[in-house]
Amino acid sequence: MPNQIKKRNGVIVKFDADKIRSAIHKANQAVGEETMTPQMEEILTRKVTEHVGGGNVPTVEQVQDCVEEQLIAYGFARTAKAYILYRAEHAKIREAESTLMDIYKELTFRDAKDADIKRENANIDADTAMGTMLKYGSEGSKYFINNHVLPKDIAAAHINGDIHIHDEDFYMLTETCCQIDLIRLFSDGFCTGHGFLREPKDIRSYAALACIAIQANQNEMHGGQSVPNFDYAMAPGVRKTFRKSYFKALGQYFEVSHGMRREDAKALAAAARESIETKPDLENGDAFGEALAAWLPPHQRDNGFEAISETEARRAHEYAMRTAEADTNDATFQAMEALVHNLNTMNSRAGAQVPFSSINYGTDTSPEARMVIRNLLLATEDGLGDGETPIFPVQIFKIKEGVNFNPGDPNYDLFHLAIRTSAKRLFPNFSFLDAPFNLQYYKPGDYNTEVAYMGCRTRVMGNVHDPEREVTCGRGNLSFTSINLPRIAIEAKGDIQKFYKTLDARIDLVIRQLLHRFRIQCGKKVYNYPFLMGQGVWIDSDKLGPDDSVGEVLRHGTLSVGFIGLAETLVSLTGKHHGESEKSQKLGLEIISHMRERMDEESRQTGLNFTLLATPAEGLSGRFLRMDQKKYGKIPGITDRDYYTNSFHVPVYYPISAFRKIELEAPYHALTNAGHISYVELDGDVCRNLEAFESVIRWMQKCGVGYGSVNHPVDRDPVCGYTGVIDDVCPRCGRREGEGVSVEKLRELRKKYPSMPRFVGLE
């Protein structure tokens, strides 16, 4: 037996035969089909030590090679295979360690334009000091997770591209996303950790605090933040602003029309506010006007003031209503404009990232909410300060028949304004509350039963843990992991049974990984999330103290399995994707149905909300493709492009009508209860053909789509600021690309389009 052994880093240490015996035992136990007695483990260990004990100091690799040889020689082929796989997994993890320093060098010394790793997240500017520091932490965290936290087979599966653990760098720290109930949060004010903020009293404050809430929550979670009831949440701010403006205008009327001293006019308006039980707002103005006319004459008489008739009181009321409505509308537009600007410029996570925000609206029919929606859409249509199309918040207009979808519905005009805005600015997207899998939760007038979507597609509604709490607000996704479907199909080589067997094994592995991560998340305390849990944003967290575990309340969240590349999977299995073949479409639905059934079964067994996600591809579709291309070469229709197709989508390169694409993808929405989206690409300037845009949205509704978006070209002339489709000549200023515009022309355009960019020194 040798006395020493050389480790991989060259260090020589004492030889320990017990480590060989332990490795043989673990490999045999992992198989379960080959029984090995302790005596046989001892024999194999002795054979290995005798073989490597030739006088020279053996290396770790030489000892492991000898273990494999002896296992095979003694007929333990399956144990040998398990041992080989174990070695391979560790080799991949060691490789990750060796590349960590190279990654740090790349982050430090290369620009984002030259380094893929610095462009992984579009919201992070990795060329800045804080952005680079965030990436240092991210990559170091991934190394730690892969080498010291994850079970070795799960780490290997992630590293080699069988699966992808999303936001792996936050594995030990937090959850994915949350749907924030601003109504509840604002009711008594809240604290961000750096001071207490009072309940807002004005629509501008409501909008500002909405941004702060999104920013504060983003600092404690690795995913996006969503407001599922934005119109309902902002309406009280409009109401408060209107009432404040009304009584200010009422005092102004008496000051001017009756010659009252300003202090007396203000006092009279204040007395009306305090004494009349009915309050003025956009909806019940007439009721307050009658109450004011009845109250004012006796009040003046009883207090010895100059008499004011009922007729004059009504005139005062009408003036105050007109003035307050106009002032409130202006304030609401300013508030919504500020919200859009703030959410595209404010930072989270040490100043390195813009919060990934999304807001849902469209179903509150109150006059105040309608004012919010209208002005938000108008502010979005105007764009940012230089006419740019705002990226955030991701806006989702919730469509509901009887509310906003058909002529005569109270918010039908806002639906049309949403179409016009989206045709110019790409947002809002559209969600469909009448889709059966969304409609089952809906209760008229209860925003907490209206399914909302978060950003790219995430959806959280059903609740196996507590069926009485199948609500939107205060819940979110805990974590999600995606499966590389095309790889399973490639390795199955057309054998459907083999495909399903491997798919089930992958699902088993991902479920085990999600539960592993969930157990870590459950070990956190309220004080680890001072805003998310400490301010009661997450459902039921308001019942916990700072030192309490969050494990029980997290059970309201979802654990999701995702997938990439159904189209390429079908090409590998059948020769055609689902856009080309009804047979492939049938198989595609069977595959995704099987995955959903596995999630439902796991939910029944564990009481946790396991859900199926149509993964938003982003960089993952490229990562899986590059790894598979290296492993299998360029396979036509499968690995011969730069990316796998997003989730269940029909490939974008395949020529197909928008309506047929929607028909094919709609059934998958019902299966992917963790989230989904269908995109439709329209050519040309859709601003000039809003009927075509609307027909697409109506077809989505009819086909049962849950969440949809219409993409189209958006150009912008940097001189005159025109936004839309620009072919050879700008429709506004007549400029061709590369041409200038005369000062006289600029001045002429300025008169016609006051919002166009200004050019210092020229105008």
Image (tube, rainbow, N blue to C red):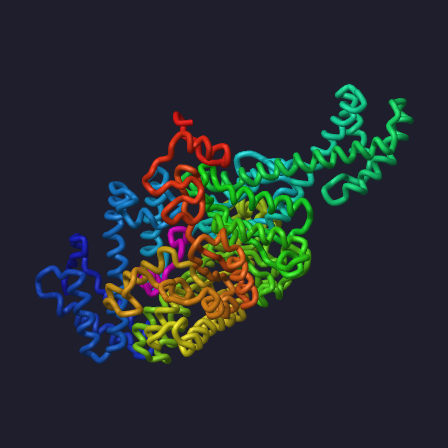
Is 736 rendered above or below residue 597? above
- The quarter of the picture where residue 490 lies is bottom left
Residue 495 vs residue 386, the one in the foreground = 386
* Residue at left offset 54%, top offset 68%: 703
Q: Quadrant of the C terminus?
A: top left
Q: Residue 585's spot in the image, x, y percent?
A: 43, 74
743 is within the stretch colored magenta = no
Residue 547 vs residue 467, the one in the foreground = 467
Is 330 rendered above or below residue 96? above
Q: Extreme left residue here?
A: 55
Q: Residue 666's spot in the image, x, y percent?
A: 50, 68
Residue 77 vs residue 402, the one in the foreground = 402
Is 457 rendered above or below residue 305? below
* Residue at left offset 76%, top offset 39%: 280
- The quarter of the picture where residue 399 lies is bottom right
Q: Residue 357's spot in the image, x, y percent?
A: 50, 47
* Residue at left offset 25%, top offset 47%: 101
Q: Report if residue 320 is visible in the image.
A: yes
Q: Report if residue 512 is visible in the image.
A: no
Question: Magenta span covers which residues?
Answer: 154-171
Using residue 71 as the reference point, say whether residue 377 is left or right of it.
Answer: right
Residue 269 vs residue 655, the one in the foreground = 655
Q: Quadrant of the N terminus?
A: bottom left
